[in-house]
Each structure stands twice: as C-alpha cells, then as structure tokens.
Amino acid sequence: MLPIPGLAEAGALTNETLFDLREDVPHLIVIGSGPIGSEMAQAFRRLGSEVSVVDIAPRILPREDADLAEVVHRRMVDEGVRFHFEASIAKVEGRRGDLRMTLKGKDGAERVIGATHVLVAAGRKANVEGLGLDAAGVALDHGRIVADDRLRTTNPRIYVVGDVAGGYQFTHVAEHHAGIVLRQAIFKLFWTKPSTVVPWCTYTDPELARVGPSEDEARKQGIAHRIYRFAFDEIDRARAEGETDGFTKLVTDPKGRILGAAIVGPHAGELIAEVVLAVSKGMKAGDISASIHTYPTLASINRRVADQRQKEGLTPSSKGWIKRVFGLQGR
Ligand SMILES: Cc1cc2nc3c(=O)[nH]c(=O)nc-3n(C[C@H](O)[C@H](O)[C@H](O)COP(=O)(O)OP(=O)(O)OC[C@H]3O[C@@H](n4cnc5c(N)ncnc54)[C@H](O)[C@@H]3O)c2cc1C
C-alpha cells in the first residue's frame, strides 16, 4: 500500500483483492498508468465503469517510447478513460462507495475528484521481510536478494527465482528462472549461459510488446542504432480485420544487426516472438527480410519493417539503375 493519508482506510484495492470483487464499480480511480494500471483501467471502462487514472508521470507507460504509448493512450481516451497526469495524491477521504481524492498539480494547485473505488497499481515490492534470510546466510542489498547469474544466493544451497530475484517481474521470467535452477540441480556439469533477452507485452487493446532497447534507451545509452517503422494500416490482414491502429519499430545497429523492436497493434504480444529469436541469435534485418512470410498475416509486418532497412541499403546509383531497367518514374 502506498503511504498516502487515508488510502488504506478507504479500502483501496490492490492486485491481490481486485479479482475477488463481487460488487459493481460505478467509478474507479486507478493510481498508476504503468502496464497493470493501463490494462485494468481499460478493462473496467469496458465493463462499464467510469475510470480516472492518476499518475505523477506526464504520460502512460513511461518505460515505452512516447510515440508507441500514445497509440494506447489515444484509444483509452476515445473509450472514455480520463487521465490526471503530473499529479501527486495529497490525501484520500471517505470509504469504499463514496471517496474523494485530493490531487496536487505541478503548479501546486489542488483539485478533488470523487469515485466509488480506488485501485493501487503502483509500488509493488518483493516480500523479503520476516523470512529469516539473515539466519540462512542469504544477503540482501537494498531489499533485493543478492544472487549470481545462476540465481545462487549467498547461501549456495538456496536459489532465488521469480519476482523476488529483483529483475524483470514477469511470469515468463519466473518460468525461465525455474529452468535455470532445475538445469543446475539435474545437469550440474552441462551449464550453458541462459538467455538474457527478455520480451514483454502490455495487454491493453491495442497491445504493446517489446524486446531489447527502446529508441529512447538506445539514444540515452549512446548505443549506435538505426530505427525503422512500418504501420499496420499498410498490412492487408490488419485492414481486413479492421485493426489498423499502430505500428512496429525495429532497432538495429548501423550494420543491420537487430537489437530490438517494439510493436503497438493487434496481437503485438504474438508478433514480437520472431524478433525475440532474431535478437537472441544475433540475426540481421536481412535475415527476416529474406524469410518468406505467409500472406495475408499480421506477422508480415516483421518482414515489411525489415525491408525498410534493405531498401535504405540501396545506393543512389543502384536505385537509378533499377529505375532505368524497369522504366520507373518518380523519386
Ligand atoms: C495485475 C498483474 C498483472 C500481471 N500480468 C502479467 C502478464 O500479463 N504477464 C506476465 O508475464 N506477468 C504479469 N504479471 C507479473 C507476474 O504476475 C509475476 O511476475 C509472476 O507472478 C511472478 O511469479 P512469482 O512466483 O515470482 O511470484 P508470485 O506469483 O507473486 O508468487 C509468490 C507467492 O509467494 C507467496 N508469498 C509471499 N510472501 C510469502 C511468505 N513470506 N511466505 C510464504 N509465501 C509467501 C505469495 O502469496 C504468492 O503466492 C502481472 C502482475 C500483476 C500484479
């Protein structure tokens, strides 16, 4: 529970209590517009609730590039979700059923919003207290269990897996961790370094999936990179399904090696899998470009975006030569 005056007393919901609700939710305030907050806000809006999202950040999904997050934000606004960005919460008054939340803007101005329920979708932390880790010789560092890349803690007979390992908090990461630990227990001698390429997806509609560095991260970390985009409204399957919102963004190094990708659009969580393999195996955009993709599929967007890289690779003289051979007009 976030340390906000009146929040706990108001019967605030968390991910642990939300799914046991048996009552109507006429107006829900969601604290946090990260993946969980955004997913739940859209879900409740679609179930018929009024939904207001409050976040101290200036926009939703702050870990994702702004242009991708904006596609999801726009859809949620169109569906009637209201947003209060750059707002801190001064206090909550009342009880579940009749609540008031006082927000403080960046300029210090206060305003009060009313609701029936409030959901805390921020501040989840690993539960490492009260386990007697000290007595077991398992060291903590700032609330994180210290472990090596084999997930061995400072007590070599104790491993750590899942969210409590302190890395990415996803079910598929917990599953991956379980595999690492089992392999060590059973095949101690045949240790191979596990993959560190971790994809994820936010299951809003449209979905937003990612693997590798975002454009923003590549720039901030000084990684030499190139960006290629392709929109779903140019993909025949997306047009046939009437789901043309969104685009894909491919991040490569200057030689075309794929560093990562982000996809916002229909079934993005499925489509990212091809790029996960490409990143894991150090493939180039040309490898995806050269692979035949079935028509008409959403997955062909992966080839079409990789083709952007291949087209860019053409020199002006080779472009001129192609135009001359085929009698093409234009630029
Ligand atoms: C709302 C929500 C949506 C999510 N959606 C996705 C998603 O779409 N995809 C995805 O990959 N990930 C998602 N996640 C993250 C995912 O749930 C976690 O990464 C995953 O469950 C981690 O597994 P775990 O076993 O490490 O921890 P958990 O699943 O949290 O299991 C830990 C268990 O330990 C128990 N426990 C805690 N403390 C103690 C104690 N002291 N003694 C005994 N037992 C204890 C807990 O009660 C719990 O049962 C979501 C998380 C939330 C909250």
Image (cartoon, rainbow, N blue to C red):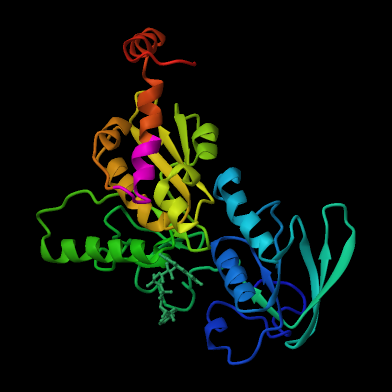
Q: Residue at x 60, y 45 (%)?
A: 66
Residue 9 falls in image quadrant: bottom right
Up-down: is 151 above or below 210?
A: below
Find the magenta span and give its range: 295-305
Residue 302 falls inside the magenta stretch: yes
Q: Is residue 40 visible?
A: yes
Q: Residue at x 49, y 56 (%)?
A: 243
Q: Residue at x 54, y 48 (%)?
A: 64
In the shown orientation, is residue 161 left or right of residue 48? left
- Residue most toward the front? 327
List x then y, in percent, for residue 317: 38, 7
In the shown orientation, is residue 232 left or right of residue 198? right
List x then y, in percent, for residue 120: 63, 73
Residue 248 falls inside the magenta stretch: no
Q: Residue at x 23, y 63 (%)?
A: 179
Up-down: is 281 above or below 322?
A: below
Residue 61 falls in image quadrant: bottom right
